Each structure stands twice: as structure tokens, then as C-alpha cells.
Image (tube, coloured by chain):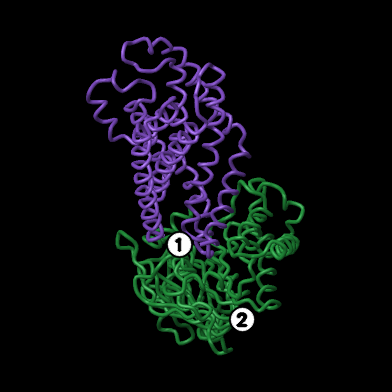
Chain colours: A purple, B green
């Protein structure tokens, strides 16, 4: 077990290093959510005045949503890295060493988690600078934890898909056709009691919404921990199932070699 | 492990890929420890599939194998610790430096830090990569990447090394250097090497023993000299001025006692003779008498190409061009 953990860390280091060697990419992944916060924060500023919205300021409301969305997208793109590694023969080289198979996927997830913490820190700082107010640090920790669970789940799905289809185009299409709609079918931008009933119904089963609801609830002055724990629990189960699917997909890849 | 135990034993390996392509069709062979063993065959013959199975990357549908005394299906982890693998495609991480590549590879084998750093520097030195060690691999030339590939395969000091077409795509000069290195590994370090190649010359020069693989099966096995010796005699190749297809050439020459194994393919005619120098004038005379005009004649001692022709009924270059179904992955890798 310790060997597997060590190997996961070696893989994490590899992915982090590759990431930070592409500063343009890092900048791009950060600029996009910053634009979301600035743009949507301004555009929908007065939305909170609609009776029943239930939040004092839109930037308070929006920031946790953007944190979830950003980590979700990072997770969705995770499969691209696997495809590059498959195309370059790197995965095959690793598979004939005694490396734990879990470490090959685990390293990607840990890297995602670490990057998510950095992204969240930057976005929350920006939110605070724009006037968002959160009473408890614990709430922020819950928000990041739920985002990471969600991101890990989608990273697993993306990696699994990549292992099976081995085509960049398919992963890109999946990210665009699945992740973006899931974002809009959640309360990232809009309070749930103001959206049409069918969206509300879908959102109840939408993992993106679980993360947003849990994170946002944890950031209120008097959180209802029942709501938070239930959503966090769903996310944990969902992430576990996705990770299991990813390992199945990886085995399918090995059978096809 | 005693001296007599083969480094690699494969028996009855069968592998069928989805779509019904039978990449391996009952392959069996043994490799003596400390020798260079060659698998020669055209693309799609099943060489890479064999390497993938023996290195635990892929599983056979039928058959079994032991590598370094360990069962590839029941003890894959032991096998992986015993072997080094250099795949047909480069497996280097192009976004990392040469040294970082080596370091990670060693870490995966659980090597200690000091041991690993020393070994990495040693291999970088040996493969002429010391100056490039801390550069991103993307900036390396093809030959440098290939040398790094081999260094990666050697980092943990394996007893058995798999080289899957190690010189494919390299220019001749780099290839000769690679041959030197492979020879040195076998002679100085006593590493058992299984080498696949579709270069006849490479198999001829490097391997102690070899198998010729065609369509997933072994069609000939032995030492290069022995295989060539079995052909008994010189190869006569004649280039005709016009393509022949109506069989009159084979018919005319078939009645001569001096030559045998006559075959014609378009403008090229091949035959075999115990004494090539004595047979040539008679052959030319006979051709002239049947109204066939000759452009050129060469007589050569048997080559592995002739061995290949003898056992598969095709010349090597014909087989290379055909590669109809072949090994799905090998085709894919040729992209």
C-alpha cells in the first residue's frame, strides 16, 4: 500500500511539473473563471432583488458556483492527458513496470485536487475583493472538498472515456455536451426556487448541483449541516462509482492492447 | 535458476484481436540465457504481439510462457521486475527532461534515491546524453530519444531485455551505433536480449539464434548461418528485360539439373544452384534459346532473405507490401 501511495505521488509530481511548464495553459484556465465572476457578477447583479432569490448579494451567491464549475471543467479535461500519454506510448511503458495500476489514475486525481485548491483560493480571493462575505473558514473548506469530489468524479469519467475511445475529439465533444448543460441545469448561476420546475427536478439528481448546494449552504452564517452532509455523501458515492468505472475502462484498454 | 533454464520459454501462444484477426497462431520458442535472440518477420507477422504478451502488457488467449523463470500470467509482477522493455514506439515522456524520465522510471521500480541518481548519470553518460540530460525531451533528435528509451529499459538492471524493432526509423549511421550498443549489452553484461526486427541484416549481425515469423507462426528456427546453410547453394537472381508470366521460363529451367527452386515474379527470376558460377552460363543459354532476354545476373551466397523466401514462398519485400490483416496494433503504430 505504501508503495502504491508513493507511486501515486511520483505520478502527481510528473503531472504537476508538466502543467507548470505550460504557463500559458495555467493562465488560460484561471482567466476563464475570473471572467465568469467579473462578467456574470456584473450582468446579473440585480437578480438578487427578485423576490424569493434568497441571497443578499449576487457575488456571495455566484463565487461558490464558479469554484465548483472551474474544478468540474478541470476534471472533465483530465482525459486529454491520458490520450496524449497513450499516443506517446508512455502508458504502455508504465504498464510493464511494477507500478500500481491505481497510481496511474490516482496521480491525475491528486494533481487535480491540488490544482483545485489553488484555483479555489484565487477565485475566493477575487470574490472577497468584489465584496463577497463568508463568515466561516470551515465553509470554504467544505466548498473546496465538495468541488474536488465532483472534479475527481468527472476526471474519472473523462479518463475512462479516453481509455476506451482514445480520441481527443470524443473527449472534447463529451465535455461540451455533458458538462456545460449540467452546469446550467444546476444552481450555479440561478437560485433553484426561481427556475422552471423541470430544471429543479433534474437538478436534484445532478451531481454538479449537489456540490453547489453543499458548498453554498456551508458558507451561510448558520449552515444546515444535514443538507451539506447529505449532498457530500451523494458526491462521495458518485465519485467512488466513477473511479470504479475508470478502472474498468482501463482494464478494457489493457485487453485491447 | 540453473544455467540450463531458458531465460524465456513460450509455448502455444495464440492471440486473436477483436474482428477476428489472428495475430498469433500457436507460437512456441525458447531463449537461452545470456544470448541475443531474434524474431524476424515483416510488419504484421506477430512480433510485437509476442513482445506484448511476454512483457505482461497483453494476455494470450491460449498458451503459456515463463520469463526469467516466472509465469507471465500468474506472476506478472515478478516478470516486470526481471525485464526491461523498449517498445516499438518511443515511450519517453516528451514534456519531461531526460533525467526526470530516468528518475521516475527508477522510482517505479522502488530504487533508492542515491542508487537511482548514480545509475541515471551512468546511463546518460553511456548513451551520450549527459549534455542533454536536463533538457526537455521534445527537443531531442529521433536517435537521442531512442537511446533514452533504451536507457529507461535498463535503469533497474534487468536480466532480460526486450527490444521491439529498436532501429526502425533511424538513419543508417545511428543504426550502426545502436548495433554496437546492443552487442555490448549482451557480451559485457550478460543480459539476455530478445530483439524483433524486420531488417534481415540486423538479425544476421546481432542474433545468436533466430526464428522467422510469418502470419503468427514460426516458419523457421536456428542460427543465422545454419538457416542459410540449409539452403545448400548459391542464390542466382536474374533481372529480365520483360515481365514473364506464362510459365515458359520455369518450364525451360525446370528441366535443367544444375538449378532448382526456380521462381519468377514479374521481371525478377530467382533460382538456386550448388555451384552458381558453373550454372549461370547454362541458365543464360537456356533462356536465350527460349527467347527470353536477360538484363542482369547476380550470384550470391544465401542470405536470410532467401531463407525467408524458402519458408514462406514470398520475398521479404513482397511480404512487407502485402501486410493485409496483420497485427492491428503494429499497423496502428506504423501511422
Residue B221 drawn above or below residue A182: below
Label 2 to label 1: alpha-carbon separation: 50 Å
Q: In the rendered structure, the residue with mark 1 lies on which chain?
A: B
Residue B29 location, x and y as percent?
46, 80
Residue on which the image places disc 2: B34
In screen coordinates, is B103 left or right of B15? right
Judge the density around disc 2: few (<14), some (14-19), many (≥20) Cα neighbours within 10 Å.
Answer: some
Q: Earlier in the sequence, mark 2 or mark 1?
A: 2
In screen coordinates, is B77 left or right of B150? left
The answer to which of B171 and B75 lies nearer the viewer is B75
Residue on which the image places disc 1: B242
2 and 1 marks in contact (CB < 8 Å):
no
The answer to which of A47 and B12 lies nearer the viewer is A47
The residue most toward the front is: A222
Residue B47 drawn above or below residue B188: above
How many labels sit on residues?
2
In screen coordinates, is A149 left or right of A53? right
Residue A38 location, x and y as percent?
50, 17
Amino acid at each position: 500500500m505504501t508503495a502504491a501511495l508513493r507511486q501515486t505521488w511520483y505520478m502527481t509530481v510528473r503531472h504537476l511539473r508538466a502543467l507548470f511548464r505550460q504557463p500559458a495553459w495555467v493562465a488560460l484556465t484561471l482567466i476563464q473563471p475570473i471572467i465568469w465572476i467579473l462578467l456574470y457578477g456584473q450582468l446579473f447583479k440585480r437578480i438578487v432583488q427578485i423576490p424569493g432569490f434568497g441571497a443578499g448579494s449576487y457575488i456571495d451567491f455566484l463565487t461558490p458556483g464558479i469554484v465548483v464549475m472551474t474544478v468540474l471543467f478541470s476534471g472533465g479535461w483530465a482525459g486529454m492527458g491520458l490520450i496524449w500519454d497513450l499516443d506517446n506510448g508512455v502508458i504502455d511503458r508504465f504498464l510493464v513496470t511494477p507500478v500500481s495500476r491505481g497510481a496511474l489514475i490516482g496521480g491525475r486525481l491528486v494533481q487535480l485536487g491540488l490544482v483545485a485548491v489553488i484555483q479555489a483560493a484565487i477565485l475566493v480571493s477575487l470574490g472577497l475583493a468584489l465584496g463577497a462575505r463568508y463568515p466561516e473558514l470551515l465553509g470554504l473548506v467544505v466548498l473546496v472538498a465538495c468541488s474536488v469530489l465532483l472534479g475527481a468524479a468527472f476526471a474519472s469519467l473523462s479518463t475512462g472515456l479516453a481509455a476506451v475511445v482514445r480520441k481527443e475529439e470524443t473527449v472534447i465533444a463529451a465535455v461540451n455536451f455533458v458538462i456545460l448543460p449540467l452546469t446550467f441545469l444546476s444552481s450555479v448561476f440561478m437560485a433553484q426556487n426561481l427556475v422552471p420546475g423541470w430544471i429543479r427536478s433534474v437538478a436534484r439528481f445532478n451531481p454538479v448541483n449537489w456540490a453547489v448546494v453543499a458548498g453554498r449552504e456551508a458558507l451561510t452564517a448558520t449552515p444546515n449541516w444535514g443538507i451539506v452532509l447529505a449532498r457530500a455523501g451523494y458526491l462521495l458515492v458518485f465519485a467512488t462509482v466513477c473511479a470504479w468505472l475508470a478502472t474498468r475502462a482501463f482494464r478494457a484498454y489493457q485487453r485491447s492492447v | 535458476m540453473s544455467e540450463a533454464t531458458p531465460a524465456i520459454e513460450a509455448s502455444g501462444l495464440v492471440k486473436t484481436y477483436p474482428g477476428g484477426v489472428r495475430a498469433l497462431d500457436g507460437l512456441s520458442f525458447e531463449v537461452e540465457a545470456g544470448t541475443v535472440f531474434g524474431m524476424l518477420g515483416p510488419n504484421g507477422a506477430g512480433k510485437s504481439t509476442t513482445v506484448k504478451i511476454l512483457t505482461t502488457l497483453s494476455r494470450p488467449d491460449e498458451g503459456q510462457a515463463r520469463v526469467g523463470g516466472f509465469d507471465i500470467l500468474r506472476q506478472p509482477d515478478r516478470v516486470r521486475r526481471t525485464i526491461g522493455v523498449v517498445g516499438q514506439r518511443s515511450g519517453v515522456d516528451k514534456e519531461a527532461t531526460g533525467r526526470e524520465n530516468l528518475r521516475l522510471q527508477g522510482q517505479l521500480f522502488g530504487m533508492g534515491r542515491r542508487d537511482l541518481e548514480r545509475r541515471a548519470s551512468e546511463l546518460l553518460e553511456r548513451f551520450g546524453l549527459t549534455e542533454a540530460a536536463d533538457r526537455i525531451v521534445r527537443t531531442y533528435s529521433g536517435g537521442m530519444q531512442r537511446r533514452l528509451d533504451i536507457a529507461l529499459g535498463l535503469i533497474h538492471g534487468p536480466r532480460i531485455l526486450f527490444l521491439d524493432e529498436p532501429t526502425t526509423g533511424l538513419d543508417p549511421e545511428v543504426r550502426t551505433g545502436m548495433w554496437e550498443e546492443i552487442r555490448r549489452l549482451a557480451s559485457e553484461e550478460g543480459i539476455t536480449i530478445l530483439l524483433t526486427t524486420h531488417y534481415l541484416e540486423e538479425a544476421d549481425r546481432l542474433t545468436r539464434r533466430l526464428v522467422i515469423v510469418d502470419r503468427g507462426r514460426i516458419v523457421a528456427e536456428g542460427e543465422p548461418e545454419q538457416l542459410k546453410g540449409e539452403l545448400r547453394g548459391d542464390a542466382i537472381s536474374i533481372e529480365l528485360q520483360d515481365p514473364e508470366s506464362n510459365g515458359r521460363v520455369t518450364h525451360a529451367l525446370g528441366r535443367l539439373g544444375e538449378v532448382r527452386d526456380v521462381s519468377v515474379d514479374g521481371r525478377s527470376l530467382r533460382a538456386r544452384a550448388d555451384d552458381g558460377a558453373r550454372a549461370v552460363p547454362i541458365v543464360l543459354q537456356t533462356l536465350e534459346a527460349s527467347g527470353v532476354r536477360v538484363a542482369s545476373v547476380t550470384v550470391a551466397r544465401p542470405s536470410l532473405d532467401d531463407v525467408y523466401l524458402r519458408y514462406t514462398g514470398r520475398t521479404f519485400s513482397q511480404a512487407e507490401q502485402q501486410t493485409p490483416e496483420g497485427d492491428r496494433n503494429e499497423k496502428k503504430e506504423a501511422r
